[in-house]
Image (cartoon, grey):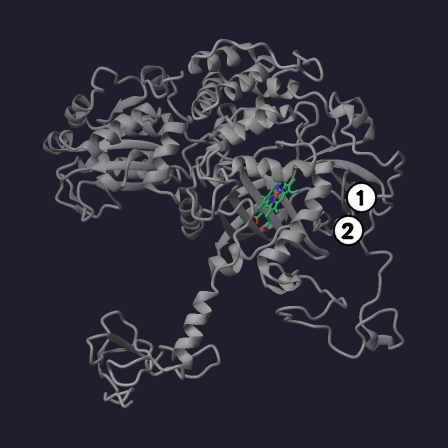
Amino acid sequence: MTIKGKKSGAAPKKAPDAAGAGEVAKGAGGETHQVAGGDVATLTTAQGAPVADDQNTLRYGARGPALMEDFHFREKIFHFDHERIPERVVHARGYGAHGYFELTDSLADVTRADIFQRVGERTPAFVRFSTVAGAKGSFDLARDVRGFAVKLYTQEGNWDLVGNNIPVFFIQDAIKFPDMVHAVKPAPDRDFPQAQSAHDNFWDFISLTPESLHMIMWVMSDRAIPRSFRFMEGFAVHTFRLLDAQGRSTFVKFHWKPKLRLQSVVWNEAVKINGADPDFHRRDLWNAITSGDFPEWELGVQLFDEAFAEKFAFDVLDPTKLIPEEDVPVRIVGRLVLNRVVDNFFAETEQVAFCTQNVPPGIDFSNDPLLQGRNFSYLDTQIKRLGSPNFTHIPINAPKCPMAHFQQDGHMAMRNPIGRANYEPNSWGEAGGPREDPVRGFRSFAAEETGPKVRLRPESFADHYSQARQFVISQTPIEQKHIGDAITFELSKVERADIRARVVSHLRHIDENLAATVANGLGLPLPEPAKAARPVIADLPPSNALSIVRNGPHSFAGRKFGILLTDGADAGLFDALVTAAEKEKAIYEIVAPKIGGVTLSDGRALPAQQKIDGGPSVLFDAVAVIISADGATRLAGDAAARDFVTDAFAHCKFIGYAAEAIALFAKAGLADDLDDGCMVLKTDADVDGFVTACHALRFWDHEAKVDLDAGA
Ligand code: HEM
């Protein structure tokens, strides 16, 4: 059959490109052709052949069928069809950045690890933060543990500190990990709820796994809804070993402490942030780094020996227990600075592969059964996820130190050993490739182990409640209230009443007030206490290090003001606020009725960063409402503007306002509630006072005035 049509490849007419990319031409169908030339590169196929037309498939006649001969189309579509790889089975949603670790205090006395020898030396680092349960496309403010995985490219091999923002874990033995993860992920029949633990399966598992109760207290606290990655701690959780040149061992727990100190949001706010900006945490990290405000953490170590381990009330191999900082102080030995965003999300953040077994000489494992299982799991899952054992060839995973080995071939091998010898021992002398190094090489701690081969949980792991209790009593009253609210909320989503009651039966061992609050919030008779495997140690002292509020920021640096402006807003007040904010190293965004901005009282035009309905107050740490009388009257009729102030109030944020704003507060129902957390701004001194007040985390008194949670 003959199909009539125009010849393909007729050159379109060119004109300068409005988008600034060379010349632009319109094709016969009106489609846009941007044309290479000057500094603009030529588009090619993956084989390097220059492409003439990327808008039209090759076809027989303008309206005829596509031709199989079109290698450019086939290559482009086939590659697109294969773009996806499996997401991580846990921690699927994550965000990474580059930086460095700098040693500030040598650990040469206890370890031969090269990274800990020379004060002032910098080691390149890559960090990936994540949520655990949600899919890759879920939202940032899920109530969840945050992953805090650090890859340190040391001169003696990559060291991965694959941690979380919580120092303990749900389970004591890795064999329970698939069950725990299945339970928290969406139910297999209905595939919901997404990125949430508030459902029957999760709480069923928890209620039958009392070892998880300590971790549960952390996850129900505000630790699980951090303000941003920049304001959270990181922990490697397990007890590791440091080994010196003689092979002597010191136990160690690793901590990351944020320079900006700790800050979280409140639950009602988290729920709204997820709607307003599901990328809240990743955007925050990206913006901080690209604006030069580099996030920073200190690396701390808790060092202890066998003698301490023997006398400690819990087993140091039990990952559901922490060692209070009051018992073993955290020694700061270095700092981690994130100073470069990725060039490409997939190439770096998605393809990075952390693994607990990646340790350099001088660092070693303990017998923690969770750690031992992790060492197996990560490598296995990454071969599946990245498709080949050669994922170590991907630049983000490759060591930055010299390396040589005889591993070869496999899918996507990028650098096979060169030369004739691909085995050892061999007779090829210097050309024979690498050899062992008994001095520099990795050596395991020569632990002497005895005992029968058994499946047996040690009795020293049997105390499930004492540290959970210690965590709760270490919180300030507002933080304790949040824990109660969170458990009540989560259990209110659990359909089976017996599961709700079983959870409360555990809480009775942790804190009777907490158990009573939750039971009351659920409308549940207080159940009998669960059968405890070990009596609770009720007199563990509170630890200040466990509270966020007690470790909150000392300034407003790195935090964000939302400044609501209208036309005619007081220019002097605005300038004073900006000056104070900049002095504080704070960030601010202008929120206005129109994204085009406002005209201030002195006639100056200012663009806005947010339109009022796209910039709710949940996106800010504190707000200022600098609006004219006319603006206040107009905004009083706008639901988004009213929400801006009522939410800021309900979420205990400091509010600074121009006197003219009162009409908006009145309409929002707040006029009678304005208290010390709401400051009228008239003078520069008022503005300074407001910014200083904002140093505190929140003005918690507001929470008593608003009914955020029916269970409270
Ligand atoms: C203290 C307990 C644990 C912590 C702190 C932890 C932490 C993490 C972190 C931070 C990630 C994300 C890494 C990244 O950003 O790519 C991750 C991923 C993962 N974890 Fe864990 N995890 C723990 C327990 C476990 C256990 C017990 C297992 C299995 C036995 C496990 C298996 C995995 C797997 C399979 C991945 C996905 C890795 C990948 O696809 O690259 N984790 N974990």
Q: Name the residue under label 1.
A: 243
Give x and y (percent) for residue 626.
21, 33
> As shown in the figure, which amino acid type bears the numbered disc 1?
Leu
Q: Which residue is drawn at 20% across and 41% down?
A: 592
Q: Mark 2 points at which residue?
A: 361
Q: Is mark 1 within 8 Å of ligand 1?
A: no
> Along the polypeptide, which appears first: circle 1 or circle 2?
1
Crowding near the residue tagged with mark 1, few <14, some 14–19, many ≥20 C-alpha atoms within 10 Å: many
Residue 59 is left or right of residue 145, and the answer is left
Crowding near the residue tagged with mark 2, few <14, some 14–19, many ≥20 C-alpha atoms within 10 Å: many
- Residue positioned most to the front: 1
Nearest to the observer: residue 316 or residue 536: 536
SS for dot 2:
loop
SS for dot 1:
strand
Q: Quadrant of ligand 1?
A: top right
> As shown in the figure, which amino acid type bears the numbered disc 2?
Pro
Q: Quadrant of the C terminus?
A: top left
Q: In which quarter of the image is the N terminus?
A: bottom left
Instruction: Estimate the spatial distance between the alpha carbons at disc 1 and disc 2, rounded to whole Å.
Output: 8 Å
Q: Is residue 114 above or below residue 410?
A: above
* Residues under numbered marks 1 and 2 in contact, where contact means CB atoms less than 8 Å apart: yes
Q: In this view, does 33 lie above or below 566?
A: below
